[in-house]
Image (cartoon, rainbow, N blue to C red):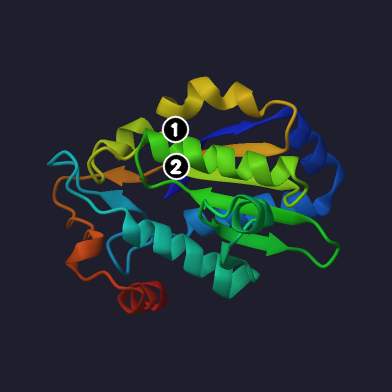
Amino acid sequence: MKVTKVYITEYAKELLNSNSVYKEAYKEVVTAISSTVWPIGSNVFAINNSVKNANGVVPLKEKCYIELEDTYNWYREKPLNVLKIEKQKGGPIDVYKEFNSGERVGMEFESGNIASAHRSMNKLLLGINRNELDLGIILMPVKGLAYYLTDRITNYEELEPYFEITEGKPFIFIGFDATIYDNNIPLIPKGKDGMSKRSIKKWMSE
């Protein structure tokens, strides 16, 4: 896949320009999403655009996580103390990395609807406000790609009017797209179609 839209708050721009660790974290996320290819064995990411909502998104999300885990030492399901201990409700961050120098970066790969995207944004903002995160990142498909993915999945443009809420905070939004649209490409399996972590690991190695 390819990154086609990015929104970086002024605060985050300052971090990227002044601290190589934050720049490294951003580069690792972009590299992880850019490494996703389809069909298996190709060197591009092509999407079947013959039918609306026909392609799965779970394999894309899982592939990105595996790349971040195996190559760059991120890890999944990081609970925030403010949610787990204080409020005792709210889920963990999708993936998280704490660098040797202490910088903490949390990332959400948004594959749910617009309400889910708002929860992801608020979760990361809460972590930043409570000094549990130093940078928050959200990945999501752009509108054109989302049309061919799972029904009701949110997209970059849908959340974009609310980006200004994060101004004054270290926050980055990334929108990704397919490299090629082709109605002859095999459909990406949906999560219920047997695209398990094991099979995605195999996909990644091929």
**Residue 172 placement (x, y as % from top left):** 63, 38
Could you say which quadrant of the image residue 112 lies in?
A: top left
**Residue 52 placement (x, y as % from top left):** 16, 38
Left or right: residue 151 versus residue 37 is: left
The C terminus - image quarter: bottom left
Q: Vertical placement of 129 versus 24: above or below? A: above
Residue at 24% x, 46% y is: 150
**Residue 19 placement (x, y as % from top left):** 85, 48
- Give residue 74's mark: none
143 or 163: which is nearer to us? Answer: 163
Residue at 35% x, 53% y is: 45
205 or 76: which is nearer to us? Answer: 76
Check contact, mark 2 vs mark 1: CB within 8 A.
yes
All told, the count of numbered labels is: 2
Q: Which SS class for mark 1?
A: helix
Cα distance in 3D space between marks 2 and 1: 6 Å
Q: Which residue is mark 2?
A: 140
* Other residues around mark 1 within 10 Å, as few (<14) / some (14–19) / many (≥20): many
Residue at 55% x, 38% y is: 121
Left or right: residue 24 versus residue 195 is: right
Q: Which SS class for mark 2?
A: strand
Kind of residue sitting beneath label 1 = Tyr
Mark toward the start of the polypeptide (2 vs 1): 2
183 or 88: which is nearer to us? Answer: 88
* Other residues around mark 2 within 10 Å, as few (<14) / some (14–19) / many (≥20): many
Q: Which residue is mark 1?
A: 156
Residue at 69% x, 53% y is: 105
